[in-house]
Image (cartoon, coloured by chain):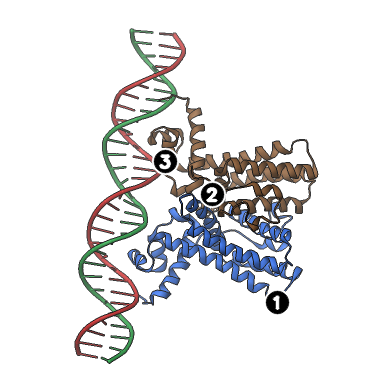
Chain colours: A brown, B blue, C green, D red
DNA sequence: CTAGTTAGTGATTGAGTACTAACTTTCTCG
DNA sequence: CGAGAAAGTTAGTACTCAATCACTAACTAG
């Protein structure tokens, strides 16, 4: 048994939670599954986080932040066409190497909707804030054209959807997408 | 108590299942919640469907089909710019009047990913087939330009995402979208 | 060494859940 | 009417899951 500081453990929990929640969603994921992946007893999660929802929220926000960071860093110092290419490339690489982050994003969107419907606006507010940070980064990188920004983000959402639905890279549905998008492959079982 | 034919009941179950699964996903929705909404005892669902998964699949596929039908009918006899406008308008009206169908679509995408990861390709195959039918309708309506088709679908996915995340219609994130998209409002608790 | 703090576990509980089996009610039609 | 089929119910099983409680093991400062 490896002892860690609470802060380090929380990090491990967040990473494990992303892969678990990504695959089976909030309700489909048991806290025991997360604990097993971390290598810790299930009750101990409740020392590190106040409850299951808090774990999900932490995983969600981390994911949003990861995407923002990757896109931001990829386009640093670039402008226009070059920036677009770099950002698209970076995003596709992220979700190719970490498909769980793609699914976690989609789980997040849906869960925001559910949370809002139940009167919890805090989670949604945080997610929207993270999204707008990403939006603004793309926006300035693209020369502050709202239409182009929207189209760029839209293609990102389409990539997410097609990958989630399991369209293989060679499928004709990928025609008409940024050519980089095609490298995106199948989701793996983990 | 109103007696119905099994076929009629199945229809009611599908409608109820869409609203329930849309909000809380596959695992978050109990068969009892669906039965309550239908106005029937919970075990009776298992006479009408072989199991919970079958109910979800029926709800998913119905939703995909609804979208396809609405888009197809809206663009009938139109071409190019006119068809685009009509389809966008029809889609936005559909998800404004039936927000549950928007969420159910997103639940479907995620659940396909989960099903594929567990070795069930049947469900995914059916969903992809439905999606391609929609794709092809849009494709021919838009004059068979793959880039435009992809961009159109992409904007649809972005609308889904923004609505799910709860961005209000007046939010600046809607700038740069088709103007029709803006009418889309908040999801309601039902 | 000792006292106190931090990291972690095992046992349990109470609520919920998908699904089955056996039974009852209502409709239909010769 | 009477009988079979179709529509529906009640009761129950076997199981899972988030969260709590009371406890132990390991580290650390004086």
Observer able to see residue B88: no
Query: Callout 1: helix, strand or loop?
Result: loop
Residue at horizontal 47 percent and vertical 62 percent from the top = B57
Place of residue B119 in the rendered image (x, y in percent of width and height, measured from the top left): 46, 52
Q: Nearer the viewer, residue A35 or C20?
A: C20
Where residue B33 sits, quadrant-wise, is: bottom left
Element at badge 2? Answer: helix
How far, Cα to Cα, is label 2 from label 1?
38 Å
Does the rendering let one see residue B189? yes
Q: Chain of mark 2?
A: A
Residue A163 x/y as whole percent: 59, 51
Chain letter for the residue marked with disc 3 in the picture: A
Q: CA distance from mark 3 to mark 1?
A: 53 Å
Query: What distance separates the C-alpha of mark 2 from that of mark 3?
Result: 17 Å
- Classify 10 Å Cα crowding around label 1: few (below 14), some (14-19), many (20 and above): few
Q: Label 2, on which residue?
A: A107
Q: Residues within 10 Å of mark 2 (few under 14, many from 20)?
A: many
Sequence order check: which comes first, mark 2 or mark 3?
3
**Is A159 in front, or is B174?**
A159
Query: Element type at marker 3?
Result: helix
Q: Are marks 3 and 1 on the same chain?
A: no
Residue under numbered circle 1: B77
**Disc 3 target residue:** A33
């Amino acid at each position: 048994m490896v002892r860690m500081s609470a802060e380090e453990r929380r990090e491990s929990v967040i990473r494990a939670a992303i892969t678990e929640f990504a695959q089976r969603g909030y309700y489909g994921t048991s806290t025991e599954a997360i604990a097993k992946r971390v290598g810790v007893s299930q009750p101990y999660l409740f020392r590190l986080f106040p409850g299951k929802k808090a774990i999900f929220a932490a995983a969600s926000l981390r994911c949003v932040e990861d995407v923002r960071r990757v896109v931001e860093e990829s386009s640093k110092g670039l402008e226009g066409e070059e920036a677009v290419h770099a950002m698209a490339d970076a995003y596709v690489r992220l979700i190719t190497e970490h498909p769980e982050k793609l699914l976690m994003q989609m789980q997040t969107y849906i869960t925001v909707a559910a949370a809002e419907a139940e009167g919890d606006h805090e989670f949604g507010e945080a997610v929207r804030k993270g999204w707008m940070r990403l939006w603004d980064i793309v926006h300035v990188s693209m020369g502050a054209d709202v239409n182009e920004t929207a189209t760029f983000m839209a293609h990102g959402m389409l990539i997410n959807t097609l990958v989630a639905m399991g369209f293989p890279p060679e499928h004709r549905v990928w025609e008409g997408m940024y050519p980089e998008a095609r490298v995106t492959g199948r989701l793996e079982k983990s």
